Structures are given as C-alpha cells and as structure tokens.
C-alpha cells in the first residue's frame, strides 16, 4: 500500500502509484513500481536510458493503459485508504472524498486525465503547435475552460459581451504566462520559430494554462545550455511557489534534480531501486553502483556525461 | 548481398569500408549520367543547352514518328487506310526542344544558385499586405459581376453565359470553402466530400417534389405554398441532414488516419452514389428526379403572370431575373460559409481544429476531445456541402447520381490543395482558376487548324489533360498552394503570416 509508504508518511500525497506494471509484448518496461508524489513538492524520477521513465509518464497521463496497477490522484487532499478502496471496488473512474475528489487515472482516457483529473504534461521531444503563434498555443491550452458552455456556444458564435469577457480572461492568463516565461516580445511569432530553450518553456507555460494540479515534465532541461537551464529552474521554482501545482519531473541533468527536487525516485530496467530525498538518493550505494555504475569519486565525470 | 538492418549494428562495430560505398539510386535504375561538378566555361552554357535541346527534339521526333506519325483510319466499310501526321510530330518535337532549351537556360543551368528563402517569401509578404484589401475587393467584384456581365455583353439575354459561369464558379468556391474546413483547417483528408453535396441535393429534390408534403402544406397554408417556399424551407434541412451524415460517417472513420481515412471517405462517396442509383423506389435510380420547382424570390415566383416577380416590381418579364437571383443566392451562401469559417477559426473549436492538424497528441494532453473535435469539423464541412447541394438542385431543377461522381470530389479537393490548405482567398482563387479556366479551354478552337489536330479534334476532351499538367506545374512551383502562409487568428501587436514551412498539413 503506497499511502503507508514510510517516505510519504508525513506529507499529503497528490499521486499514489501502486504496483504499476507495463508490458510491451515480452518486454516489461515498468515492473511493479510504487511511489508517492507529495502535494506542493517537486518529485523527480531519474534513471538510465530506457529505464521506463517516459512509460510511467505515459501511464499516468492516460496515453498508455497500464498492464497492472493503480494510479490514484487526489484533488483537495488525500483520500483515506477506505475511500480509495471503495472507489477502486466500485469500478468507477472517480469518486468524491471527504477532502475533495479522487481519480483513478488508469481508468480515464488521455484527454479526460487532462480535463477532469487536471494532470498536464510536456513531452520529451517537444510537441508545440509549431504553425500557430506563441499566443495561440497558450489559448488552445485553455480550450477546456472556454468550452465549458459547449463547443458551439452561441454566445461565442455571435461574439456576445459575455463571450468577450470570457475571452479576455483567457487572454489575460496567456499574457501572464508569456510574462512568466519572458516571451512577451515574441507573442505573435510562430512557435516553431523559437529557439529550443524558449520552446521548452513555452510548452511548460502551455501546460500550466490548463490549470493543472499535477504537472508532469519529461526531461525539460534536455538540450538546454546552462543559461537556459537556470531560467528553467527559476520557472519551475516559481510554479511551485506561486501556484497550487505539484510537479513530477523526469530529468537526466543532476544539477536540476539536486537543486529543485524535494523527493527523488530512481528507476532501473523498469524497477524502482531507490526512493528518498536528493541527499539520500545521492549517497545510496545501489544508485551509485547501478545508475552511475562507478565509484562515487568518479561520479562527477559520469554525471556530466549523462547530463549532456 | 543482403545488408543487415542498420539498427542492429552497434555504431563503430563495423570496420570502416566493409560496406561497399556504391551510389546506387534507390529505385535501382542507373542515374541519368550525373554531370561532373566542373565549373562550366561561360560560353559553353548556351552551346550545350542548344545541343541538348536539338538532340532531345530529334529523339522525341524519332520516338513519336511511329506512335503519332502514322494513323490507321477506317474509310467507310473499306480496308484500313494510313494517314500521315508528320506535322503533328514536328510540333511535338518542337515543343520538347523549346521547353528543354528554356529549362537548360534557366532552372537546370549549371552553377545556378538556388534561392533559399528565409521566412515568408516575397509573394507571401505581398499577399499579407494585400490581404485586408483582397477580401472586400473580391466580394465587391462578385457583387458587381452580373451587372458588369450585362453591360459588357450588351443586354440581359446575351449575358446569360457569363452569369451562368459565375454561378458555376461560385458553387465551387463555396464547396472549396466547405471542404477547406475539413482538409485545410482540421487536416483530415476527405475524398468523399461529394457525398454531402449529394445528400443536400437529394434532400431538397425529394422534399420539394414530394406529394404528401405538398398536400400537407396545401391543406394548411394554401395551394402553391410549397412550390413557392420549398427551397427556403428545405435549405436548412439539407444542411442539417448533410451534417448528420457527416457525423454518421465520422464516427467509424475518425479512428483511421491519413491514407486509410482518405480511402474510407472515398468509399463513402461511392456508396452514397450507388445507393442513389439502386434505391429506385425512393430516388428514381439513374433516371434522377426532374421537375424540381424553381427558386422563388422569397415566395414570389419568377414567371410572366401578374403574381410574378417582374409584374410585382414593375419590370418587363425576362427569364434572366431568375438566373441573376440565383447568382446572388449562391454568393450569399458562399459569403455565409466564409464568414462562419472566419468566426469559427477565432473560437476555441476552430483553434482546436488547427491544433489538431498541428499535433493530435499534444491536443489530447491539453484535454481536447479529439474525436468530438474531428466530428464537428466533419459536420460543419458537410453542412456547407449540403447547402451547396440544395442550391445545385434548385438551379438545375434535375438531380441524378451522374452529378455526384468521384470526379467532383477530386475537383473540389484539387481546388483546396491548389489554393493552399486553410487559406480562403487562395481557395477562391483556385476555384476561379480551375473552374473558370477549364471553361475557357472549351474555346481553344485554334487547335482545330489543319496542320495541328484537324477539324474533328475536340479541344474540350483534352481539358482534363491540360488540367492535370497545370496541377503538376503548380505543385512543383508552389507545393503548398497559391497562398501557402497561414494567418494567425489573434495577435497582440502585429499580425505576422506564418510561413508554410512551419504549418503542418495534418495526417489523418
Ligand atoms: N510503445 C512502445 N512499444 C514498445 N516498447 C516500448 C514502447 N514505449 C517504450 N518502450 C520500451 O520501454 C522501455 C522504456 O522506455 P522509456 O521510453 O520509458 O524509457 P526512458 O526511461 O524514458 O528512457 P530515456 O531516458 O531514453 O527517455 C524501452 O526499452 C522502450 O524501448
Ligand atoms: Mg524518456
């Protein structure tokens, strides 16, 4: 039972991954992984190439149906084990709890994981709408809140004042995030024209425009230069500070992991081999042996290679 | 020798040189002797171009001599006779020689620097500058067109050909704009668009000629009511039914992508046509439905009676009144299509269509229900197809399955692709070019000269060939269509066109 996990004992969980397994034919990409991501924290998932990190993300965000396991997401506050068991047994994909609501992500299709459970994500290979402008990218992300009155809302068709007000709200939000990622000047440029680092930050801003409770970032620092990487750290820290959004992060770049994460989960060959604070993980002999594959004093060299 | 798949070879494990580095073209044919990259001497460029042109002209002549030069003709019941067409061979050879000469001196010229454009091309920038003026200009011209036709051709009756042509072109403009929603905005390749056109046309044809419906209205609202009003009442019904069929088609099909989607939509178009042919009890089969009531001026018929349009508005009766009114009806319908599309593009649903074309996975990660979004695109496009179909039926006053062949879908799709997917002005331009141009090709009577094809040559039969060549040429020079850049739907400071290199075409 993940919620009884000693590491998570003290903090309220937002996501509980229980015995998650994912098989592709004969390949077991994720093998019985359990961990808990705590509310308001940055949880990092690290591991060598092919360890199954992206596969875990794809299961959480509904792009893959897990072969086995439970993915419980909590709105408001953590559910009690009884509530969790009740919803699991009911066969429904969600239920109300004393603290708020509880979603079983493995039962939801991908777009509902985003719109109902409010889990947003970015992709390892950036997926922006490259032919649309930066501003349009941020407005598309607010599709769900703008279409709450229906896809062909008559107020929108006729451009009534009530619609204009709603549109203005969406615009303000887009501008806020443009300001946060420092791309105000480039609002009218196509997203595909931006430099790599800006595209990464735009993808994060776009995900944030969906009002997520959990933000899943797949290697946000990959391919960034040190300056861009620093800007990214700052953005992530500000998201954690100013917004009610918890972050789940896959990262190879140890400087990012050590600097901003509160909790680290280490995967290798689909299995979890360590789980704890960055300091604990860093000194864990299993992690050093298998993830870095060398003695600790050589670790810095390897870190640089892995981070590149 | 069979090479192992590249992926199975760990990099660096092969001793360099173990794989023979031979440049074999992918298709296995010997490459057309690649010219050595030596710097050409200045004078030799023209010389070699001329030599090449003459040689290829001679080769064409030799090749075509047996193929085209001799022709076996039947003279009455007698034996086959041989006619000689050396003039034609010479013309073909000449065309090849001249074209090669021109190409050798321009595009194929050695050492020519290939222009690589950064950002939107000059043409795109120009189009962007002209864009605000283009739309009003297009619509003012469209409104003035019938009057210009009357003035220039000198009277109502002689202008009939031109107004008819205008109606014909505008129908395709509207169909192009309707399909543009599906193909250009949502990026779903639909090869069966004509099915919705047929649904609209048959809906109107069946309802307007239906005796029970006529009797029902005759009992409640007076004799002649249905004849006078049927088009205006059936128009929305046609659109809604077509949209309904769009959804019916959409549900099973939208799980498919790309080529598969195209094939299934093509099949759907054919199925509708075959049903129309074979369901004789309802549709009268291949014989079609005739005596559809003509269009009325909102209840006032266009006829010579005292109740007619001309008498009521103090005009002399002329059958052209109805034609000109038809022109304005299709203009209004086309304008409606354009305006609704512009509005939808600025709404979340339109943005979702374009986002879908750009990246479906990213859409899903943002919570957009892609199935629903695709269905709305299909239904909206189909609805305008249905409107156009009802208009077609009231204009021609006869529908038969013959009018809804795959050829129609292909022409409409060609208009969208040629115009530049997603661009309304581009699509309108392409419709004018293709439909108007094809019509103009009917007038190529100079080809009937004796030394060319002879008097029994019918140039209109070759329209499709010329049409095909034109399409190939445009796709070579402007692969993304006449207007390839995309205009953003919203802007903060400045509306900048997005170059076609960044805009995706969708994949299914
Ligand atoms: N759709 C799929 N079908 C088959 N195998 C897959 C699929 N997706 C992932 N895999 C396999 O699952 C394993 C884990 O892949 P995954 O992408 O999760 O690794 P990762 O930890 O994200 O690696 P990286 O650091 O390179 O991104 C790999 O062996 C991969 O080949
Ligand atoms: Mg990965």
Image: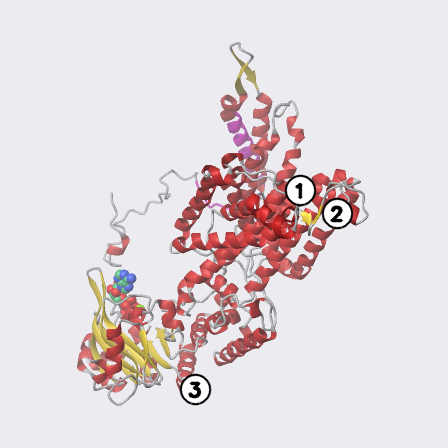
Q: Residues within 10 Å of mark 2 (few under 14, many from 20)?
A: many
Quick one: SS at disc 1? helix
Report the number of discs. 3
In this rendering, position of residue B125 left or right of residue A34: right
| Chain letter belonging to callout 3 | A
Q: Earlier in the sequence, mark 2 or mark 1?
A: 1
Overall secondary structure of the magenta stretch? helix
Picture disc at residue A242: 3
Mark 1 vs ligand 1: CB below 8 Å: no
Q: Quadrant of ligand 2?
A: bottom left
Q: Residue at x 73, y 42 (%)?
A: B303
Q: Which residues are magenta?
A: B34-61
Q: Are marks 2 and 1 on the same chain?
A: yes
Q: Residue at x 19, y 75 (%)?
A: A290
Quick one: SS at disc 2? helix
Residue corresponding to mark 2: B309
Q: Are marks 3 and 2 on the same chain?
A: no
In this rendering, position of residue B501 left or right of residue A54: right
Residue corresponding to mark 1: B165
Mark 2 vs ligand 1: CB below 8 Å: no
């Amino acid at each position: 039972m993940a919620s009884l996990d000693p590491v998570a004992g003290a903090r309220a969980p937002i996501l509980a991954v229980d015995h998650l397994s994912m098989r592709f034919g004969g390949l077991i990409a994720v093998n019985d992984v359990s961990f808990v991501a705590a509310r308001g924290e940055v949880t990092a998932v690290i591991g060598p190439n092919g360890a199954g990190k992206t596969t875990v993300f794809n299961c959480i965000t509904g792009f893959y149906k897990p072969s086995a396991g439970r993915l419980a997401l909590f709105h408001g506050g953590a559910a009690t084990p009884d509530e969790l068991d009740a919803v699991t047994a009911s066969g429904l994909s969600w239920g109300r709890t004393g603290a708020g609501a509880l979603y079983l992500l493995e039962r939801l299709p991908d777009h509902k994981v985003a719109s109902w459970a409010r889990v947003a994500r970015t992709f390892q290979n950036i997926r922006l709408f490259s032919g649309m402008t930066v501003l349009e990218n941020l407005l598309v992300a607010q599709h769900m809140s703008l279409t709450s009155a229906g896809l062909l809302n008559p107020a929108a068709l006729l451009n009534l004042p009530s619609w204009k007000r709603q549109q203005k709200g969406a615009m303000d939000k887009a501008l806020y995030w443009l300001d946060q990622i420092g791309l105000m000047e480039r609002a009218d440029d196509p997203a595909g024209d931006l430099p790599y680092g800006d595209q990464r930050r735009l993808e994060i801003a776009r995900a944030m425009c969906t009002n997520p409770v959990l933000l899943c970032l797949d290697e946000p620092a990959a391919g960034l230069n040190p300056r861009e990487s620093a800007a990214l750290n700052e953005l992530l820290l500000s998201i954690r500070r100013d917004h009610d959004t918890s972050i789940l992060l896959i990262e190879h770049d140890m400087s990012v992991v050590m600097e901003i994460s509160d909790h680290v989960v280490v995967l290798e060959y689909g299995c979890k081999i360590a789980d704890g604070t960055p300091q604990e993980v860093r000194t864990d002999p299993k992690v050093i042996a298998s993830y870095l594959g060398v003695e600790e004093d050589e670790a810095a060299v390897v870190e640089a290679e892995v981070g590149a | 020798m069979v090479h192992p798949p590249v992926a199975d070879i760990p990099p660096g494990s092969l001793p360099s040189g173990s794989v023979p580095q031979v440049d074999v073209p992918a298709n296995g044919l010997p490459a057309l002797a690649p010219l050595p990259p030596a710097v050409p001497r200045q004078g030799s460029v023209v010389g070699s171009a001329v030599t090449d042109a003459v040689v290829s002209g001679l080769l064409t002549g030799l090749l075509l001599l047996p193929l085209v030069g001799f022709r076996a003709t039947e003279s009455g019941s007698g034996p086959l006779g041989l006619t000689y067409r050396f003039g034609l061979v010479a013309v073909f050879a000449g065309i090849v020689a001249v074209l090669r000469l021109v190409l050798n001196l321009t595009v194929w010229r050695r050492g020519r620097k290939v222009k690589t454009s950064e950002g939107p091309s000059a043409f795109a920038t120009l189009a962007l500058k002209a864009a605000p003026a283009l739309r009003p200009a297009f619509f003012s011209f469209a409104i003035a067109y019938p009057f210009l036709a009357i003035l220039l051709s000198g009277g109502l009756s002689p202008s009939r050909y031109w107004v008819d042509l205008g109606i014909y072109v505008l129908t395709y403009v509207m169909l192009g704009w309707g399909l543009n929603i599906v193909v250009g905005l949502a990026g779903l390749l639909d090869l069966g668009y004509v099915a919705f056109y047929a649904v609209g046309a048959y809906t109107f044809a069946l309802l307007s000629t239906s005796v029970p419906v006529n009797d029902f209205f005759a009992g409640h609202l007076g004799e002649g009511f249905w004849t006078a009003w049927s088009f205006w009442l059936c128009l929305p019904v046609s659109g809604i039914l077509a949209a309904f069929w769009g959804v019916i088609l959409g549900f099973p099909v939208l799980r498919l992508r790309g080529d598969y989607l195209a094939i299934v939509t093509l099949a759907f178009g054919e199925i509708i046509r075959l049903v129309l042919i074979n369901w004789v009890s309802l549709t009268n089969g291949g014989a079609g439905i005739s005596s559809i009531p003509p269009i009325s001026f909102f209840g006032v018929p266009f006829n010579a009676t005292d109740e007619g349009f001309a008498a009521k508005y103090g005009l002399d009766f002329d059958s052209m009144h109805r034609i000109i009114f038809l022109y304005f009806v299709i203009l209004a319908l086309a304008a409606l299509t354009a305006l609704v599309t512009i509005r939808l593009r600025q709404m979340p649903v339109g943005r979702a269509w374009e986002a879908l074309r750009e990246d479906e996975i990213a859409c899903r990660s943002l919570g957009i229900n892609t199935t629903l979004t695709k269905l709305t695109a299909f239904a909206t496009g189909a609805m305008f197809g249905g409107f156009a179909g009802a208009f077609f039926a009231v204009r021609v006053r006869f529908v038969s399955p013959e009018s809804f062949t795959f050829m129609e879908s292909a022409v409409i799709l060609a208009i969208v692709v040629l115009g530049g997917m997603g661009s309304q002005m581009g699509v309108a331009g392409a419709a004018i070019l293709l439909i108007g141009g094809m019509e103009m090709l009917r007038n190529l009577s100079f080809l009937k000269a004796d030394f060319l094809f002879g008097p029994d040559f019918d140039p209109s039969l070759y329209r499709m060939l010329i049409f095909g060549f034109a399409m190939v040429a445009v796709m070579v020079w402007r692969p993304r269509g006449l207007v390839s850049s995309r205009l953003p739907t919203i802007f903060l400071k400045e509306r900048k066109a997005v170059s076609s290199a960044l805009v995706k075409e969708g994949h299914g």
